[in-house]
Amino acid sequence: MAFDWQEQRVIVTGGAGFLGAHLVARLRAMGAGEIFVPRKQDYDLREPEAVARMYADFPSATMVIHLAATVGGIGANRKHPGVFFYDNIMMGALTLEYARRAGVPKFVGIGTICAYPKFTPVPFKEDDLWNGYPEETNAPYGLVKRMLLVQSQAYRAEFGYNAIHLMPTNLYGPGDSFDLENSHVIPALIRKMIEAGAEGRDHVVLWGDGSPTREFVYVKDAAEGIALAAAYYDKPEPVNIGSGVEISIKTLAETTAELVGFKGEIRWDTSKPNGQPRRNVDITRAEREFGFRARTNFRDGLRETIDWYRAQLTTRPAAEALEK
């Protein structure tokens, strides 16, 4: 059955961020009646009063999609495990609790692939989520997202509340953060190789040994998957949002170098952690439950991401281009 987006008043926390901006654009393209994007400077979602005020300022909301999060790559996770835990548990728990109190009919929680155990049979099936501890470098963040899944399931069980939980794989695409302190692997690789080429360096140094694998989903595809789930999914089980395509970090680095035009050597610093050995998810539940399948070819999406980043460097100062 067709979903009437024109009747929806949607709160998108984190709607000004990387995924959020693409999701808001997708919702608008689908005809969403009204969209409210609370900004961090106006609503600190770690504080109960701010969360309550957010719902009061946008009455009659029909849905909240909770994307707001404190995130980063391996380095940021290792440096700030306490911040990552506290910020994300408070934002998630409060946003869901006050949505329930405000009578918002639907809550869409966004989890993470990092919630899976360090050693999970590939492809990752949602039912394997609890079969071990997450990879240590991002365990605090991953465990917080597991707890928010538990919260959504508990609210469904006790209050009959329509809260769902989605787990996107690694995102990439135009609009990503290229700040090396907080960026994930693809923007970090692109920036390092472009800068090395511009400075005439003959090599780049990357963390680990290149053996781990990852699955990446183009950000516009992820936005479509979230919108479909928001419209059509109403069950307690979590759902992977991914592409189903697995690639090694070594192959990723070589492909990025080719597309960027970097001719130098790729050196691996094996004193640095690899992170989780493999990541590749089972995508059958998303397709079965709400008809989602990623459509963007990885190489095409990577090229678009590189082109977007180069455009930022040529149209405004580099330092400004790297800020969110």
Image: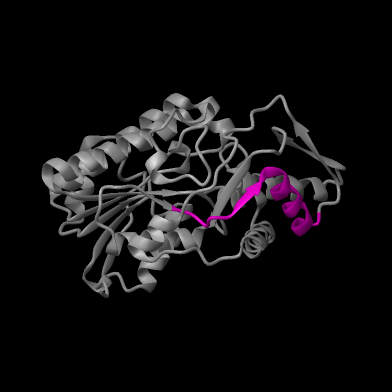
Residue 184: x, y in percent?
58, 43
- Residue drawn at the location 62% of the way across and 59% of the way down: 305
Viewer-side residue, 102 vs 122: 122
- Where is 316 relative to 140, above or below? below
- Residue drawn at the location 73% of the way across and 28% of the way down: 270
In the shown orientation, is residue 187 left or right of residue 109?
right
- Residue drawn at the location 69% of the way across and 32% of the way down: 208
Viewer-side residue, 16 vs 106: 106
In the shown orientation, is residue 103 left or right of residue 112?
left
In the shown orientation, is residue 159 left or right of residue 175?
left
- Where is 180 relative to 82, above or below? below
Write down the quadrant of residue 140 in the picture: top left
- Residue drawn at the location 17% of the way across and 53% of the way down: 104
Q: Which residues are magenta?
A: 241-261
Q: Does residue 14 show up magenta in the picture?
A: no
Q: Does residue 243 show up magenta in the picture?
A: yes
Residue 35 appears in the figure = no
Residue 156: x, y in percent?
18, 45
Residue 137: x, y in percent?
53, 28
